[in-house]
Amino acid sequence: MPQTRQADGPADRTTRTVLPEPRTPSPRDAPVLHWGVIAPGGIAASFVGALRAHTEQRIVAVGSRDAGRARAFADRFGIPAAYGSYAEVLDDVRVDIVYIASPHSEHYAQALQAVEAGKHVLVEKAFTRNAREAEQLIEAARAKGVFCMEAMWTRFLPHIDVVRQVLDLGLLGEVRTVSADHGQFMDPATAHRLFAPELAGGALLDLGVYPVSFASMVLGPFASLTTVGDTTPTGVDGQASVVVTNDAGAHGVLNTSLHARTPTTASISGTRARLEIEGAFYAPATVRLIGRSNELLGYHVPDRREGGLCYEAAEAARCVAAGKSESDLMPLDETLRVMRALDRIRADLGVTFPGE
């Protein structure tokens, strides 16, 4: 079990708090679906590895435009079928749900193809290139009656359930400030996909989506949004610092960057206490409840830190088995709200992608 502890020692004995235990079900107990994987790259390998290690889910097919690449991936993970096209994955009657692991530029078209084939779909974050594509994909999924969810894995992790409970219980008082960042140093001399406009690259859709989504979860709809930042020589966003507010006047202070490795931490500060989430906040992480005098009131330590992608797959499986077309933890309207915020940030930076 994760360690959720009351602080020991003399500090503020009268106000010490035991953090709530995470309510997250074991991924291994989720109903079994048969998965197809589209685009066998690095994130797909992490996803399949997590499912094999921590769930009973079954990967039955993988598809790539390169048949040799699909076969190598299938051999690596013991997947029965390897296809040299995405359409063949969708034609495979064994496949219940498709995981879309391609670059952002391809999410919309590939997910729409899966939806039209009657397959449930889990789409890597960011969901699409822009809100217009997100709206159309959501509309198609709802019309078809299939399950559709953004693979924002953070939302499904146990420590985030602890965060939700702390907020619901009012342990922080009135929330006033949310801070979150995600920056990684990416060498501009390389041909990394994040520098490619045609692949919908840039810091925001790959890294910045985490702090923006986190702030949206905590603050709700943004009443205002202001951005400063820069672009790379290739024309994608290189760094963005964003201040948002909600209707109650609380602030979110968010940053993302391709220029430097940042702490990747998050915090929620209220009138009574604050929560601090260690880096990387978007992965399984320790959460600390800190009092107004900087005393440690309680903490939660994850029981393991690897394989966190299994939780989003388990949530999808539970929803499909229950006949649900979307997740309560990551509703499609929330995904759309985040995509609209990302559009506004890119507009402030003057970044557009080919084909938009």
Image (cartoon, grey):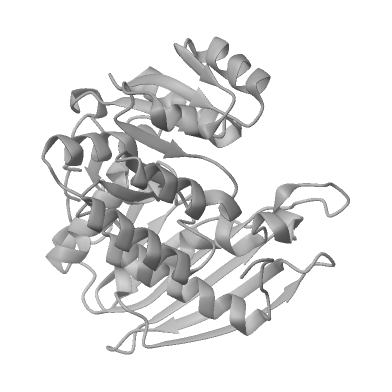
Between 201 and 171, the one nearer to me in the picture: 201
Q: Position of residue 11 (x, y in %)?
A: 28, 58
The answer to whether 334 is drawn above or below residue 90 in the figure is below
The foreground one among 184 and 3 is: 184
From the viewer's perspective, is 222 left or right of 127?
A: left
Q: How many marks?
A: 0
Question: Which residue sits furthest right?
Answer: 189
Residue 158, picture quadrant? top left
Q: Quadrant of the N terminus?
A: top left
Q: Can I make out residue 16 in this image?
A: no
Task: Please state if 234 lies on the left or on the right of 236 as rendered.
Answer: right
Task: Name the residue at 42% across, 37% down.
Answer: 99
Across and down, in percent, residue 32 comes to 23, 23
The x, y position of residue 147, in whole percent, is 25, 46
Q: Measured from the top left, where is residue 104 in percent x and y?
A: 57, 53
Q: Quadrant of the C terminus?
A: bottom right
Residue at 32 percent across and 31 percent down: it is: 303
Is residue 231 depicted above or below 206 in this figure? Answer: below
Q: Nearer the viewer, residue 54 or 166?
A: 54
In the displayed structure, would residue 315 be above or below residue 125? above
Residue at position x 85%, y 67% in the image: 233
Q: Is residue 63 among what the camera can see?
A: yes
- Residue 306 occupies which quadrant of the picture? top left
